[in-house]
Amino acid sequence: MTDDEHENNRAARMVYDALEEMHRRRREYWRSKSVGAVTKNLQAALQGSVVDVHDELRPHKHKVDEQWDEHNLDALPELAQSKIRDPSVSTKGGRVTVSQSTKPYRIQCRRLVRWSWALDEIARDLGFEAPTKEETPSDEADLDDLAWLLHVRGQDEALERLPDDYADKFRTDFEDADEEGGEA
């Protein structure tokens, strides 16, 4: 293996590692958001992982300039490094003291998620598609699957022919799901 090949493999591995970390942090964010428990630490970790992917893909920016600009990815590191000034006024013993502290700017999570999706797309276009596990179906379709398929296709007569009154058993579930716009 030549030095160039070794360097390319190392760079690709760094991109894959950064993508994997970003995906992990994004999953953590969605799980936390679903229960209303997004913490500042989680937000900071998501922000850091998105910035890491940005930094790893930036050397390849010239290959995807249009996409890079379309998603305004140059703003990401600028915002991530920004500070917020927090002035405070203290009145002790008749004296007024004005002090100012700074804290890191926190990019909104929904914006970070949109940028993470854009970075996923750019990484894929650059050939750095994150490795995914192919799911092999482990079981056959059962009567529940058949009943749902027949219902969706509007094949009520065939649905009626299922054993043990499957049609009656699932009709209520299907009607409830249709009203809610989802699956049973």
Image: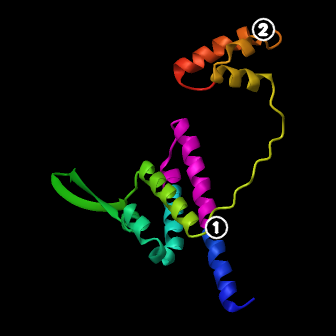
Q: Which residue is mark 1?
A: 16
Closer to us: 170 or 150: 150
Closer to us: 31 or 39: 31
From the viewer's perspective, is the residue at label 2 or at label 1 nearer? 2
Q: Mostly what secondary structure, the magenta segment?
A: helix
> Image check: 183 left or right of 75?
right
Q: Secondary structure at mark 2?
A: loop
Q: Residue furthest bottom?
A: 2
Among the 4 quarters of the image, the one containing residue 171: top right
The quarter of the image holding the N terminus is bottom right
Residue 56 magenta = no
Residue 102, percent from left and from top: 33, 62
Residue stretch in magenta: 16-44
In this rendering, the answer to whether 4 lies above or below 120 is below
- Give the residue type at disc 1: Tyr
Q: Residues within 10 Å of mark 1 (few under 14, many from 20)?
A: some
- Give the residue type at disc 2: Asp
Residue 34 magenta = yes
Q: Which residue is painted at 48% across and 58% down in the image?
A: 118
